[in-house]
Image (tube, helix red, strand yellow):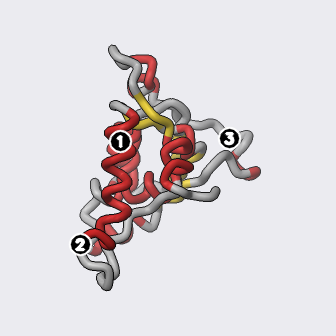
Amino acid sequence: MKIFDASGVVLGRLASNVAKAILNNEDVIVVNAEEAIITGNKKNILEKYMHRINRRSLVNPARHGPFFPKRPDRIIKRTVRGMVPYKQERGRKAYKRLKVYVGIPEEYSDTAKIVLEGSTYKKLSVPKYIKLGELSKLLGARF
């Protein structure tokens, strides 16, 4: 079982490492989901996610979906799902091996966590980013 700490890690790089691990038949747990970051201009990122959430009402008010999550743990799961062949049996089984938590649960507080050192925000040349917890609150999530 691998436990990843998402504090200060770029979302895409975290998701690619997690996707690789779950496709190799490993159980993966991600903690501190609200501390992951998305790089770029805050205004552009917020517009992009607002468009994803409000898409169904803009196109056709009676249409149900596609749905996009607002909570940070579910945004990470959705990002990993995009990197896994979830429509095939292998991908569905792999996706079920992933658990994402906001904060650190009691049972994982004293275990060793994997921190992706090369993927932190400190490596950015221009420090423009937004934390996933902040983005979720701007989208209207309650967690």
Separation of marks 2 and 1 at Cα, in angstroms:
21 Å
Instruction: Say whether residue 124 is visible.
Output: yes
Q: Earlier in the sequence, mark 3 or mark 2?
A: 2
| Separation of residues labelled 3 and 1 (CA atoms) | 33 Å
Quote the CA–CA distance across marks 3 and 2: 47 Å
Q: Secondary structure at mark 1?
A: helix
Q: Where is mark 2, residue-wise?
A: 59
Local packing at callout 3 (Cα closer than 10 Å; few below 14, some 14-19, many 20+) is few
Q: Secondary structure at mark 3?
A: loop
Q: Earlier in the sequence, mark 3 or mark 1?
A: 1
* Amino acid at the residue labelled 1: Ile
Near-viewer residue (112 or 124): 124
Residue located farthest toward the bottom when viewing the structure as drawn: 62
**Where residue 64 sits: x, y (%)?**
34, 81
Residue that mark 3 sits on:
111
| Quarter of the rendering containing residue 59 | bottom left
Q: Quadrant of residue 129?
A: top left
On the rendered structure, is 71 left or right of 109?
Answer: left
Q: Residue at x 28, y 54 (%)?
A: 83
